[in-house]
Image (cartoon, rainbow, N blue to C red):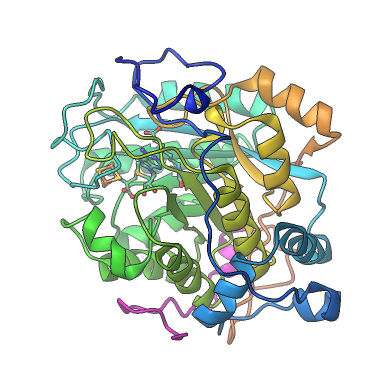
Amino acid sequence: MLSRVFASPLEEPLFLNIVELSVSHIAPSAPLETLPRPESTSRTESSADVAQTRHDWTLAEIRDIYLAPIPDLIYRAQQVHRAHNDPNEVQMCTLLSIKTGACPEDCAYCPQSARYKTELEVEKLLDTELVLHAARKARDAGSTRFCMGAAWRQVKDNQDFDRVLDMVRGVRELGMEACATLGMVTAEQAERLAEAGLTAYNHNLDTGPEFYGEIITTRTYDDRLQTLQAARKAGITLCSGGIVGMGESVDDRLAMLQVLASMDPHPESVPINALVAVEGTPMEDRPPVEPFTMVRMIATARILMPLSRVRLSAGRTEMSDETQALCFLAGANSIFAGDKLLTTPNPGEDRDRRLLDTLGMRPMAGGPVPAQQGGSSSSCCSGSCGSEAGSSKARSSKVESSTSPVHGG
Ligand code: SAM
Ligand code: DTB
Ligand code: SF4
């Protein structure tokens, strides 16, 4: 990998990670966003008011939340967080790239696109045994969710898909939540994943509808929403979020959160990734994400989606312990564990154990996924049947299929 050239010595990270791919970093010295601040409101609203689950947030309301003074923002996020979640717990998830690289899509951030020259080693679909070995290792190290990622545009009805279904069954047999991110899926494919026991489907919106076309041209925002709808209809919980630091405006970020929060029910998991600027991708020169941008995004996601697991996802390797602690205070309650994300580095077990110990926080125990109730939803039982993804099967869902935010602001 090539080392980066820093504009000033102050931008230089404390430690550069020598890894197989060049990555971005979070520089504490990057300038703060200077946008007009709304009036402080937190002191006048009760916990009950702020902790309500809503699906009709306007962009103006979301902007006021995001731009609030940090003490007000974190206070409000804590009120919401504590009303629904144990603030000292973090869900540990492990990622594995089960099929790497050579993807036909043109996602500008992604080292796995065949269109960009990155130092990535292409790998065909891994053997089921190997995947389940990795899952067992992850479980023994404290992860309760295992997420399998494939660099596919879409799932194809072939033997590879049958093997992924076996992997899902195997992960569930280990007592873990199984998550998959395989690109677009049809309703029938989502049904098959649900039957295999898939807990969650990850499909990110990545950014707001207006900026989306600058990042990806090979599939539309609507395609993404349709995949989410197919997964939801099949009774699979949703994991959907996006990336910060791709050159989007604050409103683009917030429009993405607005679309997510307009879904009824909300996605059960909302990953917030800081761009990992990989050399060879069109995003290689993007400046690092400012730490308080991550804090604001996480706090805003927490406030808009009180029951969801808000996942502090890509970008932690370059974050200080203090920034991560602020993200937890802002309501993040899930992270990816282990020393690798899909293809880029992640802090690793030792550093995370030390961090959680220092903060007096603990990994979340495994157990049923708290599937959220939709507006007109009903579950098969009150949880006594033991079914997790299955229990949401009877729910109707309202994932809007539209390229504009559902509620304007
Ligand atoms: N091919 C599938 C898809 O696009 O849905 C699954 C894999 S894809 C790598 C999963 C998600 O990882 C993307 O939607 C994006 O949000 C995130 N991601 C990929 N590359 C990233 C990067 N360089 N920095 C931050 N997040 C990234
Ligand atoms: C998500 O939102 N982030 C994860 C997971 N979902 C699949 C992926 C991050 C990938 C970062 C770049 C890489 O390692 O290739
Ligand atoms: Fe392919 Fe997914 Fe990467 Fe896009 S994000 S290039 S679809 S692997």
> In the picture provided, is 372 more to the left or to the right than 105?
right
- Which of 393 and 341 lies nearest the eye of the viewer? 341
> In the rendered structure, which segment of residues is drawn in magenta?
388-409
- Up-down relation of residue 15 to residue 180 (above or below): above
> In the picture provided, is 92 more to the left or to the right than 58?
right
- Up-down relation of residue 309 to residue 286 (above or below): below
Name the residue at 71% across, 63% down.
73
Name the residue at 28% across, 56% down.
184
Quadrant of residue 103 within the rendered picture: top left
> In the picture provided, is 190 more to the left or to the right than 115?
right
- Which of 215 and 192 lies nearest the eye of the viewer? 215
Q: Position of residue 205 (x, y in %)?
A: 38, 60
- Regarding ligand 2, which quadrant of the image does it lie in? top left
The answer to whether any part of residue 285 appears in the image is yes
Q: Position of residue 117 (x, y in %)?
A: 16, 27
Q: Position of residue 304 (x, y in %)?
A: 62, 70
